[in-house]
Image (spheres, rainbow, N blue to C red):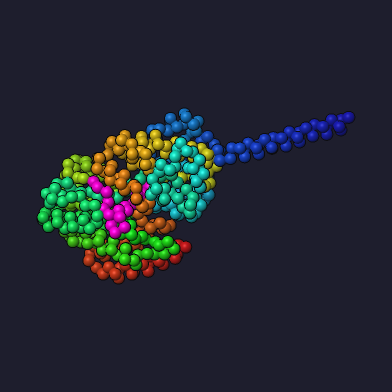
């Protein structure tokens, strides 16, 4: 009797354990990816982040998700990603990253989760509303690995007063830009017709719009270097000539945007091609002596039309190691909604949604001509402004060399041949 009773109790206990195990497995399957209600979010120090931080309480109340926010400078951010993601850590859920600088490296290493199903599943959120250029740069091997949050394009800054005095219209082609720069410099001793970045690496991004508009690219469809083309040469020669012959006297060959912008804002040049995101440097009377006369226009058309860059400077992705991917997506979905993008853009941070740029409220804080230039640039803009490689800084140093040679009046053909061979060797090493 005692023996039968003991066996019966053991059987009941075993059944209970099996049932609990089945329930546990079922629960894990149903909630896979949902994970903890605490979400680890890592963001860069940026105005976008400051605005989002103010909205975190509302997000937490609406979703019941607690956000554990880490905010770092760009260099610290990259260092943390390289250490933690390389180690396979699951301590990061949502990550703010630079698609053009780190996107290929992160995707190649398998550090970014595939978000394709997520972006395509919510019609109300509307992935098709995002501009094609930025989407191009957050898509790797046909997988969406990031959602753009901050964008920028190259536009033409110009002096209205100098054009009016010379009786010139705003250039719509690169040929017209060259002619106008020549005319204005000749008529205004001490004032350059054109200025832009001149440093080896710094010039690459702004030169890219000249390259694409001439029909060229850094890398061909087969993944090989394409610097030894007539399109690349024509773009290099034009960019170099604009600065060498119509630029500031004794121009330095190590200027990035602060130096070039200073020349323009202090009345030293008639035309300046630069990122639209820097426009307030030219329109703020506290920093610019030409604030009352500065105008903006779309990037001029080359032999292949006007094809300026239209890029995502930052995007949000989900760590491939995250066990909280469902909630990570809820965060991204919330802060990239049309409502939020509009709210953030009104604070001066250019967003990636076409509908927001088409909304009068979305452009009310921008000069009218700049908003028009941005919308025009977004239509045919190219989603990258540098070679899309793993080691971006090294690539920029290579492809930028012919630009500087052209600016200084050196042997452009030899510079291109040398850069072509060096860049091809670089690409072969990365394969």
- At 24% from the left edge and 47% from the top edge, which residue is drawn? 297
Q: Nearer the viewer, residue 346 or 174?
A: 174
Q: Quick check: is 90 in the magenta stretch?
A: no
Return the x and y of residue 179 as percentages of the image width and height: 18, 57
Return the x and y of residue 34 as percentages of the image width and height: 55, 38
267 relative to 355, above or below: below
Q: Main secondary structure of the magenta part?
A: loop
- At 17% from the left edge and 44% from the top edge, which residue is drawn? 293
Return the x and y of residue 372 as percentages of the image width and height: 28, 43
Q: Quick check: is 305 in the magenta stretch?
A: yes
Apparent side of residue 61 relative to residue 276 in the rendered image (left or right): right
398 relative to 132, above or below: below
Does any portion of residue 210 appear in the rendered image? no
408 relative to 144, above or below: below
Q: Quadrant of residue 303?
A: bottom left
Return the x and y of residue 323 as percentages of the image width and height: 55, 42
Taking the view exactly as shown, the residue that stands out farthest to the right is 1
- At 62% from the left edge and 39% from the top edge, which residue is drawn? 29
Q: Quadrant of residue 245?
A: bottom left
Q: Nearer the viewer, residue 120 or 60?
A: 120
Highlighted range, magenta: 296-313
9 relative to 202, above or below: above
């Amino acid at each position: 009797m005692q023996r039968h009773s003991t066996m019966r109790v053991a059987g009941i206990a075993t059944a209970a354990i099996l049932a609990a195990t089945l329930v546990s497995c079922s629960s894990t399957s149903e909630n896979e990816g949902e994970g903890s209600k605490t979400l680890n979010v890592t963001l860069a120090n940026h105005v976008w982040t400051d605005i989002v931080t103010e909205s975190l309480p509302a997000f937490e109340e609406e979703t019941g998700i607690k956000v554990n926010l880490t905010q770092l400078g760009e260099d610290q951010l990259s260092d943390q990603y390289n250490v933690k993601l390389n180690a396979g850590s699951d301590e990061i859920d949502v990550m703010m990253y630079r698609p053009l600088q780190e996107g290929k490296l992160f995707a190649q290493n398998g550090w970014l989760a595939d978000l394709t199903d997520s972006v395509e599943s919510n019609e109300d959120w509307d992935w098709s509303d995002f501009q094609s250029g930025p989407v191009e740069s957050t898509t790797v091997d046909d997988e969406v690995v990031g959602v753009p949050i901050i964008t920028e394009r190259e536009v033409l800054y110009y002096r209205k007063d100098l054009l009016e005095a010379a009786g010139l219209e705003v250039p719509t082609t690169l040929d017209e830009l060259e002619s106008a720069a020549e005319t204005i410099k000749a008529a205004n001793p001490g004032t350059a017709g054109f200025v832009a970045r001149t440093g080896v690496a710094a010039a690459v991004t702004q030169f890219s719009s000249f390259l694409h508009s001439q029909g060229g690219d850094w890398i061909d469809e087969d993944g090989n270097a394409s610097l030894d083309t007539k399109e690349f040469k024509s773009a290099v020669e034009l960019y170099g000539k604009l600065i060498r012959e119509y630029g500031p006297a004794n121009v330095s060959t190590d200027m990035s945007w602060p130096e070039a912008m200073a020349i323009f804002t202090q009345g030293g040049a008639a035309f300046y091609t630069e990122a639209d995101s820097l426009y307030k440097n030219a329109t703020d009377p506290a920093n610019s002596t030409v604030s009352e006369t500065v105008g903006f226009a779309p990037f001029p058309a080359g032999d292949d039309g006007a094809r300026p860059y239209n890029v995502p400077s930052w995007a949000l992705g989900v760590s491939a190691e995250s066990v909280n991917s469902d909630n990570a997506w809820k965060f991204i979905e919330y802060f990239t909604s049309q409502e939020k993008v509009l709210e953030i853009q009104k604070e001066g941070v250019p967003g990636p949604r076409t509908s927001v740029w088409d909304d009068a409220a979305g452009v009310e804080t921008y000069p009218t001509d700049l908003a028009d230039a941005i919308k025009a640039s977004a239509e045919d803009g190219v989603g990258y402004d540098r070679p899309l490689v793993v080691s971006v800084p090294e690539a920029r140093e290579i492809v930028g060399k012919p630009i500087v040679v052209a600016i200084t009046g050196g042997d452009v053909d030899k510079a291109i041949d040398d850069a072509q061979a060096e860049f091809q060797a670089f690409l072969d090493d990365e394969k």
